[in-house]
Image: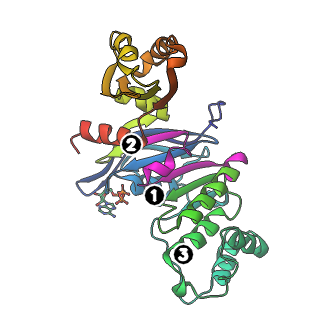
Protein backbone atom coordinates (compact mmCIF):
# COMPACT_ATOMS: atom_id res chain seq x y z
CA UNK A 1 0.00 0.00 0.00
CA UNK A 2 1.06 3.60 -0.58
CA UNK A 3 2.92 5.01 2.36
CA UNK A 4 1.15 8.23 3.31
CA UNK A 5 4.16 9.89 4.99
CA UNK A 6 4.91 11.83 1.80
CA UNK A 7 8.40 10.37 1.53
CA UNK A 8 9.24 9.77 -2.09
CA UNK A 9 11.78 7.11 -3.02
CA UNK A 10 11.96 8.58 -6.52
CA UNK A 11 11.35 12.18 -7.56
CA UNK A 12 11.86 13.55 -11.06
CA UNK A 13 11.45 17.27 -11.73
CA UNK A 14 11.11 18.34 -15.37
CA UNK A 15 13.56 15.70 -16.53
CA UNK A 16 14.54 15.57 -20.21
CA UNK A 17 17.05 13.36 -21.98
CA UNK A 18 18.13 14.10 -25.54
CA UNK A 19 20.40 12.01 -27.71
CA UNK A 20 21.75 14.67 -30.08
CA UNK A 21 18.50 16.19 -31.34
CA UNK A 22 16.43 13.07 -30.52
CA UNK A 23 14.21 13.61 -27.48
CA UNK A 24 14.05 10.26 -25.66
CA UNK A 25 12.42 11.77 -22.54
CA UNK A 26 10.80 15.21 -22.30
CA UNK A 27 9.79 17.21 -19.20
CA UNK A 28 8.96 14.23 -17.01
CA UNK A 29 7.66 14.88 -13.50
CA UNK A 30 7.25 11.77 -11.40
CA UNK A 31 6.92 10.92 -7.73
CA UNK A 32 7.08 7.36 -6.46
CA UNK A 33 6.21 7.28 -2.75
CA UNK A 34 8.14 4.98 -0.43
CA UNK A 35 6.56 1.51 -0.36
CA UNK A 36 4.64 2.06 -3.61
CA UNK A 37 4.59 -0.23 -6.64
CA UNK A 38 4.35 1.93 -9.74
CA UNK A 39 3.99 0.43 -13.19
CA UNK A 40 5.51 2.30 -16.11
CA UNK A 41 3.74 1.47 -19.36
CA UNK A 42 4.03 2.70 -22.93
CA UNK A 43 4.67 1.73 -26.52
CA UNK A 44 8.06 0.53 -27.72
CA UNK A 45 10.39 3.51 -27.69
CA UNK A 46 8.18 5.52 -25.30
CA UNK A 47 11.15 6.25 -23.03
CA UNK A 48 10.63 3.77 -20.17
CA UNK A 49 14.11 2.23 -20.18
CA UNK A 50 15.70 5.66 -20.60
CA UNK A 51 13.82 6.78 -17.50
CA UNK A 52 15.10 3.78 -15.55
CA UNK A 53 18.67 4.46 -16.66
CA UNK A 54 18.31 8.08 -15.57
CA UNK A 55 16.98 7.01 -12.17
CA UNK A 56 19.90 4.60 -11.75
CA UNK A 57 22.42 7.30 -12.67
CA UNK A 58 23.66 5.26 -15.65
CA UNK A 59 23.00 8.26 -17.89
CA UNK A 60 22.71 11.95 -17.04
CA UNK A 61 19.63 14.06 -17.76
CA UNK A 62 20.00 16.81 -20.37
CA UNK A 63 17.94 18.97 -18.01
CA UNK A 64 15.94 18.62 -14.81
CA UNK A 65 16.60 17.03 -11.42
CA UNK A 66 16.33 13.49 -10.09
CA UNK A 67 16.39 12.29 -6.51
CA UNK A 68 16.40 8.63 -5.45
CA UNK A 69 16.29 7.66 -1.80
CA UNK A 70 16.99 11.33 -1.15
CA UNK A 71 20.19 11.37 -3.24
CA UNK A 72 21.30 12.50 -6.69
CA UNK A 73 21.76 9.26 -8.69
CA UNK A 74 24.57 10.79 -10.74
CA UNK A 75 26.78 11.43 -7.70
CA UNK A 76 29.55 8.83 -8.06
CA UNK A 77 30.72 9.31 -4.47
CA UNK A 78 27.50 7.79 -3.19
CA UNK A 79 28.46 4.17 -3.94
CA UNK A 80 27.37 2.94 -0.52
CA UNK A 81 23.67 3.69 -0.93
CA UNK A 82 23.53 1.68 -4.16
CA UNK A 83 23.42 -1.46 -2.01
CA UNK A 84 19.82 -0.49 -1.34
CA UNK A 85 18.92 -0.49 -5.02
CA UNK A 86 18.16 -3.54 -7.16
CA UNK A 87 17.91 -3.49 -10.95
CA UNK A 88 16.73 -6.10 -13.41
CA UNK A 89 17.46 -4.96 -16.97
CA UNK A 90 15.20 -5.93 -19.85
CA UNK A 91 17.60 -8.25 -21.66
CA UNK A 92 19.64 -9.89 -18.99
CA UNK A 93 23.00 -11.26 -20.03
CA UNK A 94 25.87 -12.62 -17.97
CA UNK A 95 29.19 -14.32 -18.70
CA UNK A 96 28.12 -17.38 -20.70
CA UNK A 97 30.61 -19.87 -19.23
CA UNK A 98 29.94 -19.11 -15.58
CA UNK A 99 27.44 -21.16 -13.59
CA UNK A 100 24.49 -19.64 -11.77
CA UNK A 101 26.26 -20.31 -8.47
CA UNK A 102 29.45 -18.54 -9.65
CA UNK A 103 27.52 -15.59 -11.01
CA UNK A 104 25.49 -15.04 -7.86
CA UNK A 105 28.68 -15.34 -5.78
CA UNK A 106 30.24 -12.62 -7.95
CA UNK A 107 27.25 -10.28 -7.51
CA UNK A 108 27.12 -11.08 -3.78
CA UNK A 109 30.72 -9.89 -3.45
CA UNK A 110 29.93 -6.72 -5.44
CA UNK A 111 26.98 -5.98 -3.17
CA UNK A 112 28.92 -7.07 -0.07
CA UNK A 113 26.30 -9.68 0.76
CA UNK A 114 27.08 -13.17 2.15
CA UNK A 115 27.43 -15.83 -0.55
CA UNK A 116 24.90 -17.96 1.31
CA UNK A 117 22.24 -15.25 0.78
CA UNK A 118 22.86 -15.47 -2.97
CA UNK A 119 22.32 -19.22 -2.86
CA UNK A 120 19.11 -18.72 -0.84
CA UNK A 121 17.86 -16.34 -3.53
CA UNK A 122 18.68 -18.83 -6.31
CA UNK A 123 16.59 -21.38 -4.43
CA UNK A 124 13.78 -18.85 -3.95
CA UNK A 125 13.58 -18.12 -7.68
CA UNK A 126 13.52 -21.83 -8.50
CA UNK A 127 17.10 -22.32 -9.69
CA UNK A 128 18.21 -24.76 -6.97
CA UNK A 129 18.60 -27.65 -9.42
CA UNK A 130 20.24 -25.56 -12.14
CA UNK A 131 22.72 -23.47 -10.16
CA UNK A 132 25.73 -25.57 -11.20
CA UNK A 133 24.91 -25.34 -14.89
CA UNK A 134 26.55 -22.74 -17.11
CA UNK A 135 24.59 -19.60 -17.92
CA UNK A 136 24.71 -20.36 -21.65
CA UNK A 137 22.61 -23.49 -21.08
CA UNK A 138 19.81 -21.58 -19.34
CA UNK A 139 16.42 -20.98 -20.98
CA UNK A 140 15.14 -17.38 -21.29
CA UNK A 141 12.99 -17.85 -18.19
CA UNK A 142 15.92 -19.26 -16.19
CA UNK A 143 18.09 -16.30 -17.21
CA UNK A 144 15.33 -13.99 -16.08
CA UNK A 145 15.12 -15.77 -12.71
CA UNK A 146 18.86 -15.42 -12.23
CA UNK A 147 18.54 -11.72 -13.08
CA UNK A 148 15.82 -11.38 -10.49
CA UNK A 149 17.92 -13.15 -7.85
CA UNK A 150 20.82 -10.70 -8.42
CA UNK A 151 18.41 -7.75 -8.28
CA UNK A 152 17.15 -8.96 -4.88
CA UNK A 153 20.61 -9.22 -3.31
CA UNK A 154 21.06 -6.91 -0.36
CA UNK A 155 17.34 -6.57 0.49
CA UNK A 156 16.80 -3.56 -1.79
CA UNK A 157 14.73 -0.62 -0.59
CA UNK A 158 14.23 0.35 -4.20
CA UNK A 159 13.78 -2.10 -7.06
CA UNK A 160 13.73 -1.18 -10.74
CA UNK A 161 12.44 -4.01 -12.90
CA UNK A 162 12.39 -3.74 -16.69
CA UNK A 163 10.03 -6.36 -18.19
CA UNK A 164 10.65 -8.73 -15.23
CA UNK A 165 8.19 -11.42 -16.30
CA UNK A 166 9.24 -11.71 -19.93
CA UNK A 167 10.16 -15.34 -20.60
CA UNK A 168 8.56 -16.62 -17.41
CA UNK A 169 5.94 -19.36 -17.64
CA UNK A 170 2.55 -18.76 -15.93
CA UNK A 171 3.54 -20.53 -12.70
CA UNK A 172 6.81 -18.60 -12.53
CA UNK A 173 4.92 -15.33 -13.11
CA UNK A 174 2.67 -16.06 -10.14
CA UNK A 175 5.72 -16.94 -8.07
CA UNK A 176 7.39 -13.69 -9.17
CA UNK A 177 4.44 -11.63 -7.93
CA UNK A 178 4.48 -13.56 -4.62
CA UNK A 179 8.11 -12.46 -4.20
CA UNK A 180 7.14 -8.87 -5.06
CA UNK A 181 4.34 -8.93 -2.47
CA UNK A 182 6.78 -10.12 0.22
CA UNK A 183 9.24 -7.36 -0.70
CA UNK A 184 6.50 -4.79 -0.47
CA UNK A 185 5.47 -6.04 2.92
CA UNK A 186 9.05 -5.31 3.96
CA UNK A 187 8.58 -1.72 2.68
CA UNK A 188 10.43 -1.85 -0.68
CA UNK A 189 9.52 0.65 -3.39
CA UNK A 190 9.18 -0.86 -6.86
CA UNK A 191 9.14 0.69 -10.31
CA UNK A 192 8.21 -1.89 -12.91
CA UNK A 193 8.07 -1.60 -16.71
CA UNK A 194 5.85 -4.05 -18.51
CA UNK A 195 3.82 -4.52 -21.66
CA UNK A 196 1.71 -7.21 -19.97
CA UNK A 197 -0.98 -4.87 -18.70
CA UNK A 198 -3.44 -7.53 -17.56
CA UNK A 199 -1.05 -8.96 -14.98
CA UNK A 200 -0.23 -5.49 -13.60
CA UNK A 201 -3.78 -4.57 -12.63
CA UNK A 202 -3.92 -6.53 -9.41
CA UNK A 203 -0.38 -5.61 -8.39
CA UNK A 204 0.13 -1.88 -8.79
CA UNK A 205 -0.69 1.10 -6.60
CA UNK A 206 -0.27 3.44 -9.50
CA UNK A 207 0.39 3.50 -13.21
CA UNK A 208 2.31 6.01 -15.31
CA UNK A 209 1.63 5.98 -19.03
CA UNK A 210 4.37 7.26 -21.35
CA UNK A 211 4.17 8.16 -24.99
CA UNK A 212 6.95 9.62 -27.17
CA UNK A 213 9.06 10.43 -24.12
CA UNK A 214 6.32 12.22 -22.20
CA UNK A 215 4.12 11.19 -19.29
CA UNK A 216 0.58 11.33 -20.67
CA UNK A 217 -1.26 9.99 -17.61
CA UNK A 218 -0.39 8.99 -14.07
CA UNK A 219 -2.35 7.89 -11.02
CA UNK A 220 -4.10 4.99 -9.34
CA UNK A 221 -6.29 2.83 -11.55
CA UNK A 222 -9.38 4.61 -10.19
CA UNK A 223 -7.83 8.01 -10.95
CA UNK A 224 -6.97 6.88 -14.46
CA UNK A 225 -10.52 5.60 -14.94
CA UNK A 226 -11.84 8.99 -13.93
CA UNK A 227 -9.40 10.79 -16.25
CA UNK A 228 -10.27 8.47 -19.14
CA UNK A 229 -14.02 8.96 -18.61
CA UNK A 230 -14.80 5.40 -19.74
CA UNK A 231 -18.24 4.07 -18.77
CA UNK A 232 -18.79 1.34 -16.25
CA UNK A 233 -20.53 -1.80 -17.55
CA UNK A 234 -23.17 -3.79 -15.70
CA UNK A 235 -24.72 -7.16 -16.48
CA UNK A 236 -28.00 -7.84 -14.74
CA UNK A 237 -29.62 -11.27 -14.59
CA UNK A 238 -33.38 -11.12 -14.08
CA UNK A 239 -36.33 -13.51 -13.86
CA UNK A 240 -37.46 -14.73 -17.29
CA UNK A 241 -39.35 -12.01 -19.21
CA UNK A 242 -38.61 -9.22 -16.71
CA UNK A 243 -35.73 -7.52 -18.53
CA UNK A 244 -37.71 -4.78 -20.33
CA UNK A 245 -39.62 -3.87 -17.18
CA UNK A 246 -36.38 -3.49 -15.23
CA UNK A 247 -34.58 -1.69 -18.07
CA UNK A 248 -37.18 1.09 -18.51
CA UNK A 249 -36.54 3.11 -15.32
CA UNK A 250 -32.77 2.63 -15.77
CA UNK A 251 -32.88 4.38 -19.16
CA UNK A 252 -34.36 7.37 -17.37
CA UNK A 253 -31.32 7.30 -15.05
CA UNK A 254 -28.88 7.97 -17.92
CA UNK A 255 -27.97 4.31 -18.38
CA UNK A 256 -27.41 3.10 -21.93
CA UNK A 257 -28.83 -0.36 -22.47
CA UNK A 258 -26.40 -2.21 -24.74
CA UNK A 259 -28.01 -5.68 -24.77
CA UNK A 260 -31.37 -7.01 -23.71
CA UNK A 261 -32.91 -10.45 -23.87
CA UNK A 262 -35.27 -12.52 -21.71
CA UNK A 263 -33.04 -13.04 -18.70
CA UNK A 264 -30.20 -10.58 -19.16
CA UNK A 265 -29.66 -6.92 -19.71
CA UNK A 266 -26.36 -5.19 -20.14
CA UNK A 267 -25.83 -1.47 -19.71
CA UNK A 268 -23.21 1.22 -19.54
CA UNK A 269 -23.25 4.20 -17.22
CA UNK A 270 -20.98 6.93 -15.92
CA UNK A 271 -19.00 5.57 -12.92
CA UNK A 272 -20.52 8.26 -10.66
CA UNK A 273 -24.07 7.01 -11.49
CA UNK A 274 -23.30 3.51 -10.24
CA UNK A 275 -24.83 3.75 -6.75
CA UNK A 276 -27.94 5.54 -7.99
CA UNK A 277 -28.52 2.80 -10.56
CA UNK A 278 -27.90 0.04 -8.04
CA UNK A 279 -30.52 1.59 -5.75
CA UNK A 280 -33.03 1.53 -8.63
CA UNK A 281 -32.12 -2.04 -9.51
CA UNK A 282 -32.59 -3.16 -5.91
CA UNK A 283 -36.18 -1.81 -5.99
CA UNK A 284 -36.99 -4.71 -8.33
CA UNK A 285 -36.42 -7.06 -5.37
CA UNK A 286 -36.25 -10.77 -6.17
CA UNK A 287 -36.93 -10.15 -9.88
CA UNK A 288 -33.22 -9.32 -10.07
CA UNK A 289 -31.12 -12.42 -9.51
CA UNK A 290 -27.60 -11.10 -10.02
CA UNK A 291 -25.68 -7.91 -10.82
CA UNK A 292 -22.13 -7.97 -12.16
CA UNK A 293 -20.01 -4.81 -12.50
CA UNK A 294 -17.14 -4.47 -14.96
CA UNK A 295 -14.64 -1.65 -14.53
CA UNK A 296 -12.50 -0.63 -17.48
CA UNK A 297 -9.29 -2.64 -17.65
CA UNK A 298 -5.78 -1.22 -17.81
CA UNK A 299 -5.68 -2.35 -21.46
CA UNK A 300 -8.76 -0.22 -22.22
CA UNK A 301 -7.41 2.76 -20.26
CA UNK A 302 -4.08 2.50 -22.05
CA UNK A 303 -5.83 2.48 -25.42
CA UNK A 304 -7.76 5.65 -24.51
CA UNK A 305 -4.65 7.58 -23.42
CA UNK A 306 -2.62 6.38 -26.41
CA UNK A 307 -5.40 7.39 -28.83
CA UNK A 308 -5.66 10.82 -27.28
CA UNK A 309 -2.03 11.37 -28.22
CA UNK A 310 -2.65 10.08 -31.71
CA UNK A 311 -0.23 7.18 -31.13
N1 LIG B 1 21.67 5.40 -26.57
C1 LIG B 1 20.71 5.91 -27.37
N2 LIG B 1 21.01 6.69 -28.41
C2 LIG B 1 20.06 7.23 -29.22
N3 LIG B 1 18.73 7.03 -29.04
C3 LIG B 1 18.37 6.26 -28.00
C4 LIG B 1 19.32 5.65 -27.12
N4 LIG B 1 18.63 4.94 -26.19
C5 LIG B 1 17.32 5.08 -26.48
N5 LIG B 1 17.17 5.87 -27.56
C6 LIG B 1 15.89 6.27 -28.17
O1 LIG B 1 15.11 6.87 -27.16
C7 LIG B 1 13.74 6.48 -27.31
C8 LIG B 1 13.27 5.81 -26.02
O2 LIG B 1 13.89 4.54 -25.91
P1 LIG B 1 13.65 3.56 -24.66
O3 LIG B 1 14.58 2.42 -24.80
O4 LIG B 1 13.73 4.37 -23.42
O5 LIG B 1 12.14 3.10 -24.91
P2 LIG B 1 11.26 2.01 -24.14
O6 LIG B 1 9.99 2.69 -23.76
O7 LIG B 1 12.05 1.39 -23.05
O8 LIG B 1 10.97 0.97 -25.30
P3 LIG B 1 10.75 -0.64 -25.25
O9 LIG B 1 9.36 -0.86 -24.72
O10 LIG B 1 10.87 -1.02 -26.69
O11 LIG B 1 11.83 -1.23 -24.39
C9 LIG B 1 13.67 5.58 -28.51
O12 LIG B 1 13.31 6.37 -29.63
C10 LIG B 1 15.10 5.07 -28.67
O13 LIG B 1 15.39 4.80 -30.03
Tell me, for residue 209, which label it has, or none. 2
Q: Quadrant of residue 176?
A: bottom right
On the image, the x and y values in percent for residue 33 come to 59, 38
Q: Quadrant of the C terminus?
A: top left
Q: If you read the primary sequence from the N terminus, does the residue marked by circle 1 or circle 3 appear first?
A: 1
Most foreground residue, 174 or 243:
243
User: In the visual, does 127 lie left or right of 89?
Assistant: right
**Category of crowding for the residue at label 3, using alpha-carbon neighbours closer than 10 angstroms: few (below 14), some (14–19), many (at least 20):** many
Q: Which residue is mark 3?
A: 143
Q: Which residue is mark 1?
A: 53
Report the span colored magenta.
183-208
The verdict on label 3 being within 8 Å of ligand 1 is no
Compute the Cα span from label 2 to label 1. Answer: 17 Å
Label 3 secondary element? helix
Marks counted in the figure total 3
On the image, the x and y values in percent for residue 108 come to 70, 72
Q: If you read the primary sequence from the N terminus, does the residue marked by circle 2 or circle 3 appear first?
A: 3
Label 1 secondary element? helix
Tell me, for residue 39, which label it has, or none. none
Residue 211 in sight in this render: yes
Q: Please report the residue visible at 46 percent of the width from the left and 24 percent of the height from the top.
A: 238
Most foreground residue, 123 or 214:
123
The verdict on label 1 being within 8 Å of ligand 1 is yes
Q: Please report the residue visible at 59 percent of the width from the left and 66 percent of the height from the top.
A: 148
Q: Quarter of the picture for ligand 1?
A: bottom left
Q: Please report the residue visible at 31 percent of the width from the left and 42 percent of the height from the top.
A: 303
- Asked if the residues shown at circle 2 and circle 1 are in contact, with their CB atoms under 8 angstroms apart, the answer is no
Amino acid sequence: MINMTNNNSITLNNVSKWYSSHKAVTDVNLEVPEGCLMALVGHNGAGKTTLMKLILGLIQPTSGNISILGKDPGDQSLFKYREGIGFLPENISFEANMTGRELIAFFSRLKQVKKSRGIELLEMVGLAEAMDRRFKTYSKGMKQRLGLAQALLGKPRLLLLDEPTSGLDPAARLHFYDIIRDLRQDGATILLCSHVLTELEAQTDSVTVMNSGRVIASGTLDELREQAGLPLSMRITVKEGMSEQIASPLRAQQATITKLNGRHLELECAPQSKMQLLRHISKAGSDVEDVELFNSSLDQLYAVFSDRKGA
